[in-house]
Image (cartoon, grey):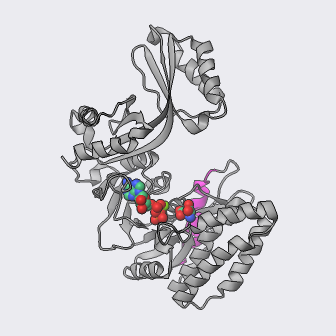
């Protein structure tokens, strides 16, 4: 049996947490491949190593040096090595790293050093082999993960390594330069290693006891989701449930490897099991989770007999496409159409140009822009089995005086999305939680 374990930033934050990680790994001999994040926050006011490293890069870019800021990195790692009483020449490693950060002068290289150093420390502590992610993970010329190639290298390289620690978050581009995933990307590394080693289980160790029904920063002590399917996970993490990176699902999906989200600080808790499909669950709940994202813009238009105008939607979307903007949702009615777009993409006059372009292209009777919209997704396979879920959501929101600006029910019957004002975001999530979970 092979288990791949990924430990997040809080689990690697200081010597005490790292010793807890060690005891978890050593409690189960199947935990053979360990992926680690850079040390995260030790408390609410602390700064993540990765954030400091990005600032080091800014310093190098501006001044050619980062010694003052890199001193923070040195202090943190030296403290960890000292507290763990490791036989490791961390001073030499840190000095070399600082020089490389200056000579490479690359944001990705600099940011990746948090995971690199973290993995060196962990490998030393465990007496395991350090295998650099730069050897294992490849990106193509477009910056996308070269997944089949990566899978081959991981399999070949780790085939005869019994026990290894691998830094998360980065790999190499096609020219051999270090490239990172987006933030939180160590979850993807763990998934890649699980696929490549044909693991039986991918354990993702974090600071909460599993995937919670909704964000614990919005609802106090939300319930833990016991089982979640790949599809539900994809919907929830795409919609902002940040416990697992939204792309972490893809590598394990290829081999149907389950993911277990576990709490480093409460290892006895069962956590959440993420399974390939409904076939593997025994859940009878209507909804599985709620997640949301802020800051969308809705462009709403109305035109009589829109539905009989050939090519209407295509013409509207071609205007949006012309500006290289991605569309999130396109809910439509008999004579109405809305396009929902992340507001970030509509800055610097793009919104006005798109609206003018739509006016010219399809001549709507009415066009109207609604800004500062949050999208909240209520997700669960259970919805398809029971009627009245949408009605229950709408009633819960109406009872709290929350005005729904947009509704979209995914064609998969797995997801109902509502759009509300940003100012109603938290209350909307709380209202849905109360209606379904606390009923
Ligand atoms: P790690 O550093 O271990 O990767 P993250 O900070 O990336 O951990 O993810 C865990 C955090 O995700 C939790 O501490 C919690 O604040 C947040 N979070 C947001 N939504 C959820 C959710 N639905 N379930 C659990 N945690 C969530
Ligand atoms: N350290 C990186 C970050 O803070 C990657 C990770 O933790 O997954 O985003
Ligand atoms: Mg994370």
Quarter of the rendering containing residue 173 = bottom right
Residue 194 covered by magenta stretch: no
* Residue occupying image coordinates x 71% and y 50%: 141
Q: Nearer the viewer, residue 96 or 35?
A: 96
Residue furthest out toward the left = 439
Is 208 rendered above or below residue 330? below
239 vs 121, left or right, is: left
Q: Residue 422's spot in the image, x, y percent? A: 44, 39
Residue 148 covered by magenta stretch: yes
Residue 256 at least partly seen: no
Is 347 rendered above or below residue 279? above
Image quadrant of ligand 2 equals bottom right
Total residue callouts = 0
396 vs 35, left or right, is: left
95 vs 276, left or right, is: right
Quarter of the rendering containing residue 317 = top right
Q: Residue 12's spot in the image, x, y percent? A: 50, 74
Prevailing secondary structure class for the magenta stretch in the rendered image:
helix
Q: Residue 4's spot in the image, x, y percent? A: 45, 69
Quarter of the rendering containing residue 119 = bottom right
Residue 10 at least partly seen: yes
Q: Residue 15's spot in the image, x, y percent? A: 49, 82
Q: Nearer the viewer, residue 402 or 273?
A: 402
* Residue range highlighted in magenta: 144-161
């Amino acid at each position: 049996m092979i288990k791949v374990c990924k430990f997040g930033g809080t689990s690697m934050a200081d010597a005490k947490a790292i010793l807890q990680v060690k005891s978890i790994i050593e409690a189960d001999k199947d935990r053979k491949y360990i992926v680690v994040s850079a040390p995260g926050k030790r408390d609410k006011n602390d700064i993540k190593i990765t954030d400091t490293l990005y600032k080091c890069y800014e310093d190098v870019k501006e001044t050619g040096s980062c010694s003052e800021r890199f001193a923070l990195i040195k202090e943190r790692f030296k403290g960890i090595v000292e507290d763990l009483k490791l036989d490791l020449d961390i001073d030499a490693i840190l000095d070399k790293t600082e020089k490389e950060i200056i000579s490479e002068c690359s944001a990705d290289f600099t940011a990746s050093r948090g995971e690199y150093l973290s993995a060196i420390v962990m490998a030393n502590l465990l007496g395991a082999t350090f295998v650099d992610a730069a050897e294992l993970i490849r990106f193509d010329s477009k910056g996308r993960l070269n997944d089949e190639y990566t899978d081959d290298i991981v399999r070949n390289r780790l085939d005869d390594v019994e026990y290894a620690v691998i830094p998360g978050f980065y790999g190499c581009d096609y020219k051999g330069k270090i490239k990172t995933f987006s933030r939180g990307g160590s979850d993807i590394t763990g998934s890649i290693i699980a696929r490549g080693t044909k693991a039986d289980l991918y354990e993702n160790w974090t600071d909460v006891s599993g995937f919670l029904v909704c964000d614990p920063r919005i609802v106090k002590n939300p319930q833990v989701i016991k089982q979640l399917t790949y599809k539900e996970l994809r919907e929830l993490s795409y919609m902002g449930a940040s416990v697992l990176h939204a792309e972490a699902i893809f590598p394990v999906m290829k081999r149907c490897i389950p993911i277990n989200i576990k709490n480093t600080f409460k290892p006895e808790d069962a956590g959440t099991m993420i399974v390939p499909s409904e076939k593997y669950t025994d859940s009878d709940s209507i909804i599985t989770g709620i997640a949301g994202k802020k800051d969308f813009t809705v462009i709403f238009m109305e035109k009589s007999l829109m539905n009989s105008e050939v090519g209407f939607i295509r013409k509207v979307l071609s205007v949006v496409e012309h500006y290289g903007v991605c569309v999130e949702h396109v809910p439509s009615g008999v004579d109405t159409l809305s396009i929902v777009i992340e507001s970030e993409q509509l800055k610097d006059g793009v919104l006005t140009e798109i609206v003018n372009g739509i006016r010219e292209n399809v001549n709507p009777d009415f066009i109207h822009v609604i800004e500062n919209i949050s999208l909240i997704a209520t997700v669960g396979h259970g919805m398809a089995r029971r009627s009245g879920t949408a009605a229950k959501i709408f009633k819960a929101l109406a009872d709290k005086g929350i005005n729904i600006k947009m509704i979209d029910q995914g064609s998969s019957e797995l997801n109902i999305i509502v759009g509300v004002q940003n100012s109603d975001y938290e209350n909307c999530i709380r209202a849905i939680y109360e209606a379904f979970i606390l009923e």
